[in-house]
Amino acid sequence: MATPNYGYEKRQRELAKKRKKEEKLKAKAERKLLGPGEGDAPPDDEADDDAAPELPPPAAP
């Protein structure tokens, strides 16, 4: 039976940590470029997209 290559596994974990850290730094830089409040929440007109559309009131008979 082959023995586990712990060095390889450790290197892969280190690379994954490095990638994750770089992604976080990139996302942080993008948020900084957008400015405060621009990327936090969708505008009000997009917030109701999932809600049922409003129907006009029924016509009087």
Image: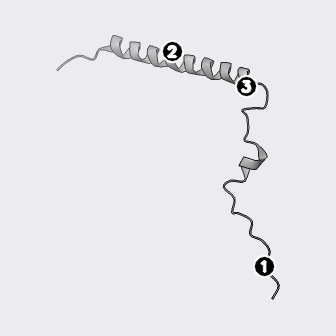
Q: At 69% from the left edge and 63% from the top edge, which residue is drawn?
A: 52
Residue 33 x, y percent position in the rendering: 72, 21
Q: Amino acid at mark 3?
A: Leu
Determine whether the residue tagged by mark 3 lies in a helix, strand or loop. helix
Residue 47 x, y percent position in the rendering: 73, 49
Q: At 36% from the left edge and 17% from the top edge, which residue is drawn?
A: 9
Determine whether the residue tagged by mark 2 lies in a helix, strand or loop. helix
Q: Which residue is mark 1?
A: 58
The reply to whether callout 1 and callout 2 are in contact (CB within 8 Å) is no
2 displayed left or right of 50: left
Residue 57 x, y percent position in the rendering: 80, 75
Quarter of the image with the N terminus is top left
Q: At 77% from the left edge and 71% from the top edge, which residue is drawn?
A: 56
Q: Which residue is mark 3?
A: 34
Determine whether the residue tagged by mark 1 lies in a helix, strand or loop. loop
Chosen colour scheme: one colour
Q: Earlier in the sequence, mark 1 or mark 3?
A: 3
Q: Earlier in the sequence, mark 1 or mark 2?
A: 2
Q: Earlier in the sequence, mark 2 or mark 3?
A: 2
Of 31 and 22, nearer the camera is 31
Quarter of the image with the C terminus is bottom right
Q: Amino acid at mark 2?
A: Lys
22 displayed left or right of 61: left
Q: Residues within 10 Å of mark 3 (few under 14, many from 20)?
A: few
The label shown at residue 18 is 2
